[in-house]
Image (cartoon, rainbow, N blue to C red):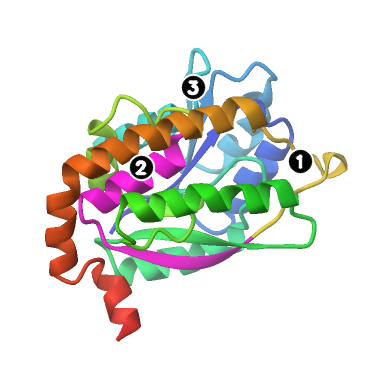
Amino acid sequence: MNPLILIPSYNTGPILSRTVADALSCWPQVWVVVDGSTDGSAALLDDLKAVHPGLRVLTLPRNQGKGAAVLHGAAEAAKAGFTHVLTLDADGQHPAGEIPRFLALAEAHPQAALMGRPVFGPEAPQLRVQGRKLSNVWAHIETLGWGIPDSLFGMRLYPVEALLRAFAGTAWARRFDYDTEIAVRLAWLGVPMLAVPTPVRYLTREEGGISQFRYLRDNALLTWMHARLLCGFLLRLPRLLWLLGKGGNPLRRARAG
């Protein structure tokens, strides 16, 4: 197994360098995909690049969305011989201290997608915490309960080949819809999934916290996405029933047993 830490970033400011430094303290191979940032945050990584040969910064000329950044990084990772990518958000929400646990689980389950299940602290905005529940319900329906623990959480470890196959099945999943749609499409492909409880922290503005989430825009995108996925689910229902007949997600079945 040859894993890579992959961090998509768009206008995340100084928090980016801290996120990357924390990731490098846990694993030497870290790539950052700068998704058309205009805030100069990419330049803050120059000092880290000078002392960490495993740090690579890929730059997209214009903002294309989180999913597009992950796709670009994953495709380049595959060319470089990496077998797995562990995605982290650049805004400091995902604890780098969890990286060794994800990598150890990947060694034990190399064919699986390891899906972070957020453990929220008291500072988490309730609008975000409660709002994601609807998306989770729809993802559960669209996969016949394959075992997606949280459809919107971004700390995940994917087998690169499976991730690229999931992206190849859609022209969408390039922006905020990426996390949910790719999870659903991985389930449709029959990729085993393992839930990994993971602390998540919402940083205050004073701590450098920043969010690109836009309530109306992104919820409209999610609504359109679930409408599309529901149609795709109906077309794939015979295969999903066949997978269910074989026992469904093998990791979920093993835990239940």
Q: Residue 94's spot in the image, x, y percent?
A: 61, 53
Q: Residue 253's spot in the image, x, y percent?
A: 27, 76
Return the residue nearer the eye: 179 or 112.
179
Q: Which residue is mark 3?
A: 59
Residue 83 seen in the current view: no
Return the residue nearer the eye: 92 or 225.
225
Tell me what residue is drawn at x 38 percent, y 70 percent.
105
Q: Residue 137's spot in the image, x, y percent?
A: 46, 54
Q: Amino acid at mark 3?
A: Thr
Q: Quadrant of residue 45?
A: top right
**15 left or right of 69?**
right
Q: Residue 89's spot in the image, x, y percent?
A: 57, 43
Q: Which secondary structure, mark 1?
A: loop
* The residue stretch that appears in magenta: 177-199
Q: Which residue is mark 1?
A: 209
Q: Is residue 162 above or below residue 254?
A: above
Q: Which residue is mark 2?
A: 182
Return the residue nearer the eye: 97 or 118.
118
Residue 161 seen in the current view: yes
- Mark 3 Cα-neighbour bin, 10 Å: few <14, some 14–19, many ≥20: some
Q: Which secondary structure, mark 2?
A: helix
Q: Quadrant of residue 121?
A: bottom right
Q: Amino acid at mark 1?
A: Gly
Between the C-alphas of marks 3 and 2, the distance is: 22 Å
**155 left or right of 161?**
right
Of callouts 3 and 1, which one flags the residue occurring earlier in the amino acid sequence?
3
Q: Amino acid at mark 2?
A: Ile
